[in-house]
Image (cartoon, helix red, strand yellow):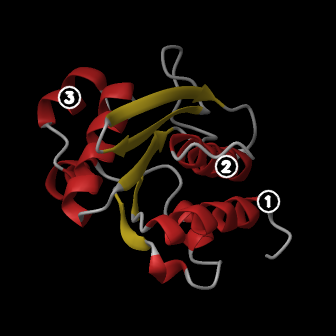
Amino acid sequence: MADDPLVALAGQLQAICVPRGITVGTAESCTGGLIAHVLTEVPGASAYFAGGIISYSNGIKERDLGVPAEILARHGAVSAQTARAMATGVRLRLGVDLAVSVTGIAGPTGGSDEKPVGLTYIGVADGEGVDVRRYVWTGNRTANKRSSAEAALTLLLERLGDEHT
């Protein structure tokens, strides 16, 4: 795992967060805990990584992350609105400084013309607010999950102002 580019990004994140005293949490749907896994591959992650919520179902998104049922009904689980609510919800519930959320359609099924396989929204929340980005990956299920995790880690680094991403 040491030469895994995802672990390298996680190491960069840890190197920035620990000295600054910044805590991080995750809310993951389509990545199924991959981001949390990668963060904990770096020894010492407990110094800044508080934990995560894997909210694969809408019920968990509502109950554990506080995503309003109206957002899920109106925009769907895979939407910018849901990613925003997930990031905000996990930040508040875990009491962390910085949070990332990922919701998408990893594939190979589940897509539609409006929401194709590979469509993913990633949200990053801190005390200043929430940013959400939209991606459409074109790989297989594993590649789409890894691309989402990489984008999430990169967005966290960008939010922290790291110039090395």
Residue that numbered label 3 is attached to:
71
Which is nearer the eye, 144 or 1?
Answer: 1
Give the mark nearest the N terminus, 1 or 3: 1
Q: Amino acid at mark 3?
A: Ile
Check disc 1: other Cα within 10 Å, few if <14, some if 14-19, many if 20+. Answer: few
Tell me, yes or no, if residue 60 can be seen here. Answer: no
Residue 107, above or below 78: below
SS for dot 1: helix
Q: Amino acid at mark 2?
A: Glu
Q: Which mark is residue 5?
A: 1
Residue that numbered label 2 is attached to:
150
Instruction: From the top left corner, tell me how far across and down residue 51 is, in percent.
Output: 38, 71
Q: Amino acid at mark 1?
A: Pro
Which is nearer the eye, 99 or 161?
Answer: 161
Check disc 3: other Cα within 10 Å, few if <14, some if 14-19, many if 20+. Answer: some
Q: Residue at x 50, y 22 (%)?
A: 115
Q: Name the image quarter holding the N terminus.
A: bottom right
Q: Nearer the viewer, mark 1 or mark 3?
A: 1
Give the mark nearest the N terminus, 1 or 2: 1
Q: Residue at x 29, y 23 (%)?
A: 75
